[in-house]
Amino acid sequence: NLVCSELEDLWSLLPSLPLSSSFSLSPSSVLGLGALASITAYWLVTRPRPMRPPCDLKAQSVAVNVSEARRSAILKDDTLLEFYYDDTRTAYDMFQRGLMISGSGPCLGFRKPGQPYEWISYTEVAEQAQVLGSGLLAKGCQPNPEQFVGIYAQNRPEWIISELACYTYSMAVVPLYDTLGLEAMVHILNLAEISVVICDREEKAASLLENKEKGTTPKLSCLVLFNDFSQAFVERAKSCEVEVLKLEQLMVSWGTLTNCPCIKILPYKMFDCLRGFAVCRCLNLICPLCFFCSFHFSFFSQGSFEIQQDDVSISYLPLAHMFERMIQVSMFCYGARVGFYQGDISLLMDDIKTLKPTFFPVVPRLLNRIYDKILGSVTSPFRRALLNYAVKRKQAELSSGVVRNNSLWDKLVFNKIQESLGGNLRFALTASAPISPAVLSFLRATLGCLIFEGYGQTECTAGCTFSMPGDCSTGHVGAPLPCAMVKVVDIPEMNYYAKNGEGEICIRGPSVFRGYLRDPEKTAEALDSDGWLHSGDVGQWLQNGTLRIIDRKKHIFKLAQGEYIAPEKIENVYMRCVPVLQVFVHGDSLQSYLIGIVVPDPEVFVDWAKDRGFVGSYEELCQNPDVKKAVLEDMSAVGREARLNSFEQVKDLYLHPEMFSVANGLLTPTLKSRRADIRRHFQEQISSMYSKKAN
Ligand SMILES: *[C@@H]1O[C@H](CO)[C@@H](O)[C@H](O)[C@H]1NC(C)=O
Ligand SMILES: *[C@@H]1O[C@H](CO)[C@@H](O)[C@H](O)[C@H]1NC(C)=O
Ligand SMILES: *[C@@H]1O[C@H](CO)[C@@H](O)[C@H](O)[C@H]1NC(C)=O
């Protein structure tokens, strides 16, 4: 349930990112060690002044009057922030604000292979959205928030234009995505009574048409495509009473309407996002502003940190998820730019170099890869020593609140790394899963930009806590945002008690969703009668008022000797191992130790094994007992480093050559492990591992 933790899993399903050899130390870094002393002296002299945090970092949240909850220390009293700008309350308003600020300035960027970015202006986006929205009305959509329009496409400008088209006429967007799986897709199309779906390519439209042909989605009547499509497809659609149009055609159809209906624009007040089989309805959009408004509070007087009109972010995380959509509307609110990747994750680094983003939204898995790549590129002992020394110096500077990319260390050691990310980064935001403190602190030093960590989930419009500007410490997810109150409640069976500052994290406030669309039962499970959203995550309040995520509420079992095991926590640790792509940790009260099912990462496994003297294909390596032993050793080492107890370490493994996926029934539509099904599926291997050890 961590912010769209689907995202993180989704990422693991994408082909891994070839970071090429772009991460290397600058040639100029080959210096005599003797020079280090004088560099240090120079650094001391040129050290800039630290950033002023918006509140005392030793007391980032305070107890709410007569309640066990806590709220942001930035707030003056217990009144939560609902809107940052009084006239900016919806996604539509936020775009309008950007339009007002930027006008004909660039808004959405895209590129063809090898070309520079081309930009569509705010004015053009607003105009196209209005015309497209009118076109949707001409196709029978009603201008009200109960009208759902599907969008089934990769991130690209048309996605945003279509979304804004809906908001312009108070309609709601339901994003669809591939990994949702057929069953969930059909369920959602019917639940939201969707008649029009906007798609990027014919293949996607065809998969929707297939359902219509089978009679499972009777309401579907119109498919709108970004790309060209075949005449055969039009005929096929016609035979099951579905109209197929190009996006431009829909826009033209408005222009040709002679009797244009007069439409009263009701700016869209709700924000919908898919959550597995459900559609989340969030009342309004304060959260994205809250994400960034702590910056305002802190830097308003200095004016040195808030999103600015010349900020640029790169869009590659799936727009079907709240995290990416929140980021985009936040950018629009300030009249800033969003550049889209080409749609091919293997070209992402090239897109980043070309776009030169100032803002990099990212998930821990990608940051881990960047970290591994940097360390992997430094082989000579001298360079490694230099890197470590430089990182230590930068970290010391960071701990006193100084964030910069122009120290001598940046110039000498880190500039190649920074250039490979475009050389313009001002800040990054990681969410969706916990990030290792070591990786975060290393990257804060080497990238020389602010890296924030957020925590939340779709049901609270993506964010409920956020790390404070100026706080460069790690191991927590920051304090509650000004729009949310957070409390922890007892979980006796797991021995967590609120009186000790530990328990299930619950969230209340205007950013919490109103419920799942047409699903009161599931809504009641998530939202209690007092309006608290139960997250299922276990948190701990730290002395300085920040929150640390320590566990997940569900999935807990006892081993034979009575030790409690939370397998997901252990799996998160093992995910840090280079050869591991997916891992499932198993045990039960009849056994005294844990075992694991591991799917090795196809991108790196063969090379990883080769480095250790094992040769063979991916499948062969999976069957090699010595390779298994090497993987197990690697996992144990990572486990020790993360301070797993010895009973929390797996004692045997099975290497499985096929990914857990939605298609093979081992992942849920939100890409979480179906634990019971995985257990059943691997029953034979599990029994054999336990019987082998017993002998
Ligand atoms: C706390 O709430 C009580 C009752 O609502 C009120 O009388 C008291 O003044 C409040 N204290 C503070 C510090 O706001
Ligand atoms: C350093 O950071 C500033 C903004 O803080 C940015 O404008 C500049 O491009 C960055 N330079 C490099 C080399 O990353
Ligand atoms: C907040 O407390 C945690 C845990 O004690 C610590 O690791 C972190 O450095 C502290 N942060 C600040 C800014 O004091």
Image (spheres, rainbow, N blue to C red):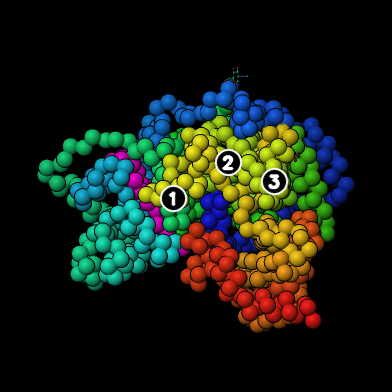
Residue drawn at (85%, 50%) of the image: 32
Q: Which amino acid type corresponds to the residue marked 2 in the rendered image?
A: Cys
Q: Nearer the N terminus, badge 1 or badge 3?
A: 3
> Amino acid type of disc 3?
Tyr
| Discs 3/2, front | 3
Q: Position of residue 551 (x, y in %)?
A: 66, 51
The 10 Å Cα crowd at callout 3, few under 14, some 14 to 19, many 20 or more, is many
The secondary element bearing badge 1 is classed as: helix
Callout 1–callout 3 Cβ contact below 8 Å: no
Relative height, residue 673 to residue 136 (above, below): below
Tag 1 near tag 2, CB within 8 Å: no
Disc 2 crowd rating (10 Å Cα; few below 14, some 14-19, many 20+) is many
Residue designated by label 1 = 521
Quick one: 599 or 351, which is closer to the camera? Answer: 599
Please indicate, yes or no, whether residue 60 appears anywhere in the rendered image: yes
Left-right relation of 39 to 362:
right
Counting residues from the start of the chain, the first of labels 3 and 2 encountered is 3
Q: Is residue 233 left or right of residue 413?
A: left
Tell me the tag on residue 496: 3
- Residue 174 drawn in magenta: yes
Residue holding disc 2: 506
- Compared to residue 275, the image places residue 558 above or below, namely below
- Of 213 and 518, nearer the camera is 518
Q: Examine the structure image and report whether residue 185 is included in the region drawn in magenta.
A: no
Secondary structure state at the residue bearing disc 2: strand
Residue neighbourhood size for the residue with mark 1, other residues' Cα within 10 Å, grouped as few (<14), some (14–19), many (≥20): few
Distance from the alpha carbon under mark 1 to that under mark 2 = 19 Å
Which image quarter: residue 12?
A: bottom right
Q: Amino acid at mark 1?
A: Glu
Which range is magenta? 160-179
